[in-house]
Image: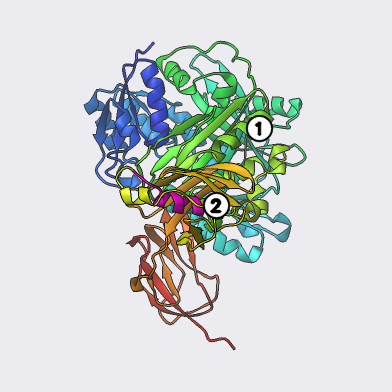
């Protein structure tokens, strides 16, 4: 038995904070590492000690195994937990940790190596009689093989994946997948297999000790995905027959035994509409969605990882599961704008209700450009699936999230969608329903009026406003205020209020009570520190308002056809042959930006001629930077 005393987490953000929570409960000292942008991050503030990794990019910081091991030794840590992502599935890093005399909180390096390549892993699984999809040679693909899924052999998180439905697009998609895989993982190997339409992503959590015991801790459904990255997960996976559950459990245990696995891991399967399972991959680490399994089995998987690393044996059988758990990943992104990630100050993050919230942020923190834009994981556990889904949707709908556009409304609508509530899950959910889930914003009139009333409400240090108090619900020379929200301008008339169906009950700078169509509603109002945005939350929805100046700033104007950077990032690719003078067509991808672990295409706004190109491959650009200019061709 090994007796651990101090733990370094070779990661950042939410997962580091979550691991520190368990480490403290077990009496372990905690050590954080951080890049320069993360110097004041929550995981750094949360640890007993922290060591700087100079630089900003992951390649210079969280992917530098040598610096992390040096930090662990310098801080007196005797164990390293990799979390998920970064170096968590890097066999060489695991070996180097062990060679430095430190305890590795993960599976043996040989097991990581065996499963690191999806192509080699499939060969092992075939030998272990785990069901597999047959591979397809891209060079010999025929129309009968379509649709195809291209996947990076060393990949994860949706990077290096492309769906091909037309053979004419196969070559371009293959080149793009290889380029992305090489950029993300340093390995350009890509393979192809049949793409299963309306399949389900179902996985099994396994836990194994060094004494021959392997637990299969139930199933999870992770079918709701965007860009092949999970959005909503739940345990157990609904609607599976007992025979299928048994097959999945047995296959997962066989996969673990095939590589002499130890610690926590996940075996992922694709389940077809008619209930046939196929092995996808094995993640040799803790998964993002592990809290739903913890909830239904009443376990702490991180505590079990640590005990297994110390040499402890698992009981012969796992505990019995109870109830149902659902997790939603709250991202700083705009689903209506091609899932565009958001950066900036997070003024408020308050999620109430009987839910678990795992996050790496608190009020006032900044979401930067270098890392994944996930703000939090929100988990509800209840006796039944319907109760868990309802509790999670209610908690998210009532959350106050100020400063950044998020996918919160998408999550709430997804959880309340008839297909989801009925358990009809598959990986094409967002392809079919994204427009419905992101359209039709709630009416903002009452919320905009609440913003105006809060701005004008009397305060102790504003006696003039106090003398102007006494809201009158009559029509006579009202004051007006204009706001912009989600690209729409709203003009409200107040003092006195001049909006049919709305009556003011009370107003303070932070809380406005209105009677809307005979129903009394509370509107919670908050301004950011520089008073450039106003946030209004109520049961009718959440709104962010920007006051519209009376006279527009001439500097806000840009040349027609200008393509501006929608976010800070790095130009990773420019369309082949693109140069000033090149003809372009509307919707044509001109260049690709990489930001927050995702690639984003910059499209031509209209057909015409590229008259200017202001960037080059590898160049970093700021938000709003001028990338290129397209002169639209005259209409016939």
Point out the stretch of residues depicted in magenta. Answer: 448-459
The numbered mark at residue 528 is none
Q: Does the magenta stretch include residue 452?
A: yes
Most distant residue in the bottom direction: 636
Q: What element carries label 2?
A: helix
**Residue located beneath label 1 in the image:** 130
Query: Magenta region, mostly helix, strand or loop?
Result: helix
Residue 417 location in percent, x, y? 68, 43
State the quadrant of the N terminus: top left
State the quadrant of the C terminus: bottom right
Q: Which of marks 1 and 2 is nearer the N terminus?
A: 1
Q: How far apart are marks 1 and 2 (CA)?
A: 57 Å
Residue 562 location in percent, x, y? 42, 73
- Assess whether mark 2 and mark 1 are in contact (beta carbons under 8 angstroms): no
Judge by depth and name the residue closer to the eye, 533 or 248: 533
Judge by depth and name the residue closer to the eye, 383 or 314: 383
Most distant residue in the right direction: 274
Q: In this rendering, does residue 183 appear at all?
A: yes
Q: Residues within 10 Å of mark 2 (few under 14, many from 20)?
A: many
User: In this picture, is 261 found above or below 231?
Assistant: above
User: In this picture, is 66 found above or below 473?
Assistant: above
**Residue located beneath label 2 in the image:** 446
Q: In this rendering, does residue 368 appear at all?
A: no
| Residue drawn where x is 28% and y is 23% of the image | 77
| Residue drawn where x is 73% and y is 32% of the image | 239
Q: Is residue 620 left or right of residue 157?
A: left
Q: Is residue 564 magenta?
A: no
């Amino acid at each position: 038995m090994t007796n651990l005393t101090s733990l370094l987490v070779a990661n950042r953000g939410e997962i580091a904070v979550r691991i520190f929570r368990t480490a403290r409960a077990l009496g372990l000292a905690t050590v954080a590492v951080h890049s320069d942008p993360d110097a004041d991050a929550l995981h750094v503030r949360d640890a007993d000690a922290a060591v700087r990794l100079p630089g900003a990019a992951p390649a210079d910081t969280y992917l530098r195994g040598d610096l992390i091991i040096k930090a662990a030794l310098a801080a007196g840590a005797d164990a390293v937990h990799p979390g998920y992502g970064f170096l968590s599935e890097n066999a060489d890093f695991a070996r180097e940790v062990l060679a430095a005399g430190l305890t590795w909180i993960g599976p043996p390096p040989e097991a990581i190596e065996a499963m690191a390549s999806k192509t080699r892993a499939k060969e092992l699984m075939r030998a272990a009689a785990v069901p597999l999809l047959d591979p397809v040679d891209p060079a010999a693909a025929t129309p009968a093989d379509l649709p195809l899924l291209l996947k990076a052999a060393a990949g994860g998180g949706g990077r290096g994946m492309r769906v091909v439905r037309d053979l004419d697009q196969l070559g371009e998609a293959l080149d793009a997948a290889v380029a992305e895989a090489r950029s993300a993982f340093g390995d350009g190997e890509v393979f192809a297999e049949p793409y299963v339409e309306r399949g389900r992503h179902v996985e099994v959590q396994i836990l194994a000790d060094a004494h021959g015991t392997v637990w299969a801790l139930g199933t999870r459904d992770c079918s709701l995905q965007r860009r092949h990255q999970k959005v909503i997960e739940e345990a157990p996976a609904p609607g599976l027959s007992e025979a299928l559950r048994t097959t999945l459990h047995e296959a997962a245990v066989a996969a673990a035994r095939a590589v002499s696995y130890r610690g926590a891991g996940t075996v992922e399967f694709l389940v077809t509409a008619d209930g046939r399972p196929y092995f996808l991959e094995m993640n040799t680490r803790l998964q993002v969605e592990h809290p739903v399994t913890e909830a239904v089995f009443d376990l702490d998987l991180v505590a079990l990882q640590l005990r297994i690393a110390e040499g402890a044996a698992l009981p012969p059988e796992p505990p019995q599961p109870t109830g149902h758990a659902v997790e939603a990943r709250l991202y700083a992104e705009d689903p209506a704008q091609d899932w565009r990630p958001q950066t900036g100050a997070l003024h408020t993050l308050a999620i109430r209700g009987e839910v678990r919230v795992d996050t790496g942020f608190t009020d006032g923190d900044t979401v930067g450009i270098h890392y994944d834009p996930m703000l939090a994981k929100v988990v509800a556990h209840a006796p039944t699936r319907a109760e868990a889904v309802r509790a999670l949707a209610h908690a998210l709908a009532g959350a106050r999230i100020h400063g950044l556009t998020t996918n919160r409304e998408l999550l709430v609508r997804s959880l309340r969608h008839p297909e989801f509530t009925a358990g009809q899950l598959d990986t094409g959910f967002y392809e079919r329903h994204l427009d419905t889930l992101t359209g039709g914003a709630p009416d903002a009139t009452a919320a905009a009026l609440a913003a105006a009333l809060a701005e004008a409400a009397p305060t102790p240090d504003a006696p003039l406003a106090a003398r102007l108090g006494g809201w009158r619900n009559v029509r006579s020379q009202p004051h007006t205020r204009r706001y912009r929200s989600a690209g729409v301008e709203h003009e409200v008339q107040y003092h006195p209020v001049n909006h049919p169906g709305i009556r003011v009950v009370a107003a303070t700078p932070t809380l406005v009570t209105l009677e809307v169509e005979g129903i009394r509603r509370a509107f919670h109002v908050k301004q950011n520190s520089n008073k450039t945005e106003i946030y209004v939350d109520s049961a009718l929805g959440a709104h962010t308002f920007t006051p519209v100046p009376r006279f527009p700033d001439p500097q806000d104007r840009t040349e027609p056809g200008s393509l501006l950077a929608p976010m800070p990032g790095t130009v990773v690719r420019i369309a082949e042959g693109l140069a000033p003078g090149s003809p372009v067509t509307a919707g044509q991808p001109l260049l690709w930006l990489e930001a927050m672990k995702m690639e984003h295409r910059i499209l031509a706004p209209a057909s015409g001629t590229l008259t200017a190109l202001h960037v080059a491959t590898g160049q970093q650009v700021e938000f709003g930077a001028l990338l290129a200019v397209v002169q639209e061709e005259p209409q016939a």
